[in-house]
C-alpha cells in the first residue's frame, strides 16, 4: 500500500447531509419572496386597480411627469388636457397617479 492509497483511505468518501445545507436554499427563496416578489406584485395590483377607476374629470400625473385632466377614457387609452388647446392621447398604463381635486390650479 503506497502513500496515495493511504491518503485516499484517510479522507471520508461521503458525508451525511446537514440540515443547514438543506434549509439554506429554502430560506433564501422565502426571503426573496417576502423582500422582492410580494411587494412588487402588491404594487402592480394597486396600479391596475387605480387604472380601472379612471374617469372623466380626474386630474392625473403621468409616469413621465406630465399633469393633466382626463377628457375621455377609452378601453386602453385616455385623452388628457394639459393646457388650453393642448390635448393628447396616451395609454392608461402611463398614468402614474390620480391627484386630489383642484391640484392643477395650485400647481400653475
Image (cartoon, rainbow, N blue to C red):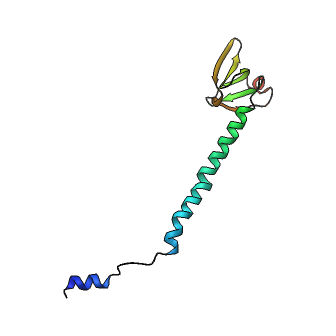
Residue at 72%, 35% (x, y): give it. Answer: 50
Which residue in the rendered view is the most extreme toward the bottom? Answer: 1
Identify the image quadrant of residue 67: top right
In the figure, 18 relative to 74: above or below? Answer: below
Residue 11, horizontal then vertical, whole percent: 32, 82
In the figure, 94 relative to 23: above or below? Answer: above
Q: Quadrant of the C terminus?
A: top right
Which residue in the rendered view is the most extreme toward the left? Answer: 2
Q: Quadrant of the N terminus?
A: bottom left
Q: Is residue 95 found left or right of 102 in the rendered image? A: left
Residue at 65%, 17% (x, y): give it. Answer: 88
Residue 56, horizontal then vertical, whole percent: 77, 23
In the figure, 35 relative to 57: above or below? Answer: below
Residue 16, horizontal then vertical, whole percent: 45, 78
Identify the image quadrant of residue 96: top right
Residue at 64%, 49% (x, y): give it. Answer: 39
Is 86 in front, or is 93? 93
Is 63 in front, or is 18? 18
In the figure, 23 relative to 58: above or below? Answer: below
Residue 32, horizontal then vertical, whole percent: 57, 56
Amino acid at each position: 500500500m503506497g502513500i496515495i492509497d493511504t491518503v485516499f483511505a484517510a479522507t471520508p468518501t461521503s458525508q451525511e447531509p446537514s440540515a443547514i445545507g438543506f434549509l439554506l436554499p429554502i430560506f433564501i427563496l422565502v426571503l426573496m419572496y417576502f423582500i422582492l416578489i410580494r411587494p412588487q406584485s402588491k404594487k402592480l395590483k394597486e396600479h391596475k386597480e387605480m387604472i380601472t377607476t379612471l374617469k372623466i374629470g380626474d386630474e392625473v400625473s403621468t409616469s413621465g411627469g406630465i399633469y393633466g385632466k382626463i377628457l375621455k377614457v377609452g378601453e386602453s387609452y385616455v385623452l388628457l388636457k394639459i393646457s388650453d388647446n393642448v390635448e393628447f392621447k396616451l395609454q392608461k398604463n402611463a398614468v402614474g397617479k390620480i391627484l386630489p381635486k383642484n391640484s392643477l390650479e395650485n400647481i400653475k
